[in-house]
Image (cartoon, rainbow, N blue to C red):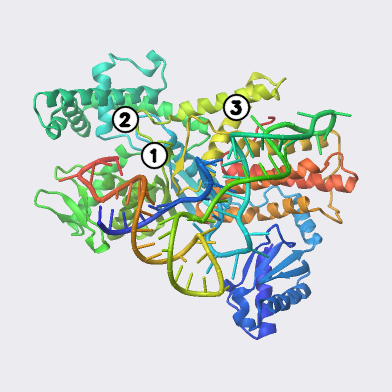
Amino acid sequence: MIRIEEKIIQETIVAISKLYQAEADAKKIQIQKTIKEYDGDYTLVVFPLLAYSRKNPQLTAEDLGNYLLNSMIEIAEFQVVKGFLNLKLSQAFWIDFLDEIRQTETYGIEGVTENSPQVVIEYASPNTNKPLHLGHIRNILLGSSMANIFKAKGKKVFSVNLINDRGIHICKSMLAWQELADGATPESVGKKGDHFVGEYYVAFDKEYKKQIAELMATGMPEEQAKEEADWLKKARGMLKRWEREHKKTRDLWKDMNTWVYAGFEETFAKLGVHFDKTYYESDTYLIGKEVVLKSLKLGELSTKPDGTVFLDLTEYGMDEKVLLRSDGTTVYMTQDIGSAILRYDDFNFDESIYVVGNEQDYHFKVLRIILDRLEFAWSNRISHLSYGMVELPEGKMKSREGTVVDADDLLLEMYTTAKNTAEQLGKLDGLTDAEKHDIYMKIALGALKYFILKVDAKKNMVFNPKESIDFNGNTGPFIQYTAVRINSLLTKANADNVPYRHRIHRNSMDSKELELIKLIYDFPILLQEADEKRSPSVLANFAYDLAKEYNQFYHNHKILNAEDEETRSFRLVLSEKTGFVLRATLGLLGIEIPIRM
RNA sequence: GGUCCCGUAGCUCAGUGGAUAGAGCAACAGCCUUCUAAGCUGUGGGUCGAAGGUUCGAAUCUUUCCGGGAUCACCA
């Protein structure tokens, strides 16, 4: 089915050639939706076409309007306002469209085929020394929503998680546990594993600072004190033992990571995300190291007198990038080279996307260049989906200052708000506790996910913990509520055996009905845009527009009690399709619709 | 200092070459004997950070400046 906008463009090109004997550049033909102030559905902006017509805007628009009116059966009338040709489509066009999608259950959604491109998307990527926070939530929601969007565009998608499970920061929490825990476990103290481990990471920092202060009190300079502090030395020793695969160290490491993973899984499950594969940096860093050593032998890399291996990127306007430290250990970049290679071997991807904060823009730029220099032909298939930070009103979240918004705390808070609101409204009376719990959860998540996803990914965003996330207005629950209303209406229609699933007849629609159909018609375009721009916010804003439009329609139209049967059927189909698109769009954002609210 | 991102209503955000710049929140005023009021309607609120340039047309492109942030590690 060709889109009407496309058809108008094609016809306009023909019109220009027939009327003005000119070959029009398709890029100069702009079709946009007619703004509310004027009558029409689509507007052709004629200013760019004056070079072809050599007439004034008014006359050009009239020429083209008359031509299109004659050549396109879909066009019912036109109006010229200054340089804008406002085209109004026939009612039949919109009715036929609605009728066409009446039976389909997959409107706008594309299926996966054998030839579908293979896309790997990495997100979450937590460290195992602390629990997830709001920053991770933005990352996870962006990643999982993009995975949904790619799937809906018929791509074969694999979600992967890369866990940073090794390094000095992990050893810090291990050491603190060893020194302070006296054998305590998450079970023995009744704490979620990631929070439990995170507390030891904080405890390390506290003790470390104390030791630095003590050393400085003896007259030692700060720089030196930071290096000489007892616990830091111990943590470093632990890292060395870890790298030598010292059994006791590895056992402790495994135990603590296992606790953390259990905690992460719980949070992932609550957020409704899952991964097709989980990678661990402890498995990939050596692959990177091997590749680097091999490339060194082949003369692709350079060495410094102290043994440091690096790649000179000055020709790209960047610095020298170290790939192996003078002591032979790997750096972050080396690990990521290994991860990328392993991922290509596993998935043979057409695209590999990293959802990582914009503070790593430089890192990923360099990663691509390095992979290119090391002659991996697929280096141009990896890309960085960069997103902005989540800030508090007073600025950046800082774990050291305790201003981090914890993911689990936030979810619990959202849940409580959902529960309180629902109880106040008293709409869930008569449901079981399990049903209520399910509803609170879906609303809480709807509010949180929408709040995060409606903001353009690349922008920094502000979260104010004191003003909890709204449930009214431009929010997830507002859209969910609209969908629930529609479902309730359809349930009622079915219960009363109201027939409406037959071919639609409708002689005249009013503006609200028409607006709804037009928005439904836009859904595939917005999905496409979300895919191309890699931006769930496009869909979030669309869902809001659609819900808002429906609520206005609902408010001043009778549906089940419509004046006649034809009107009732038409409005029910319109409601059903609106509900479908709302559900689909919310689904792409990872938001579910409760049974009642 | 170099590079990159951002700056739109009191607050949170849409709009990235087209018509008189939009929502929500907050404030105020209305609408439930009518299919779910987590809804609907109305009022007030803007030199789109500033100045120049390109264009028939600029919040949008461009230059400079101002403000905020990120990054330029043998941290990840």
Q: Does the CB distance between marks 3 and 2 fall below 8 Å? A: no
Q: Residues within 10 Å of mark 3 (few under 14, many from 20)?
A: many
Q: Residue A55: percent from the left, percent from the top?
A: 66, 82
**Label 2: element kind:** loop
The residue tagged 1 is: A125
**Label 1: element kind:** loop
Q: Residue A578: percent from the left, percent from the top?
A: 71, 46
Numbered badge on residue A509: none
The residue tagged 2 is: A400
Numbered badge on residue A418: 3
Residue plotted at (44% across, 41% down): A139
Query: What's the amino acid at mark 1?
Result: Ser
- Chain under numbered label 3: A
Q: Is residue A480 above or below residue A299?
A: above
Foreground of the two, A365 or B27: B27
What distance separates the C-alpha of mark 2 from that of mark 1?
A: 20 Å
- The answer to whether any part of residue A396 appears in the image is yes
**Label 3: element kind:** helix
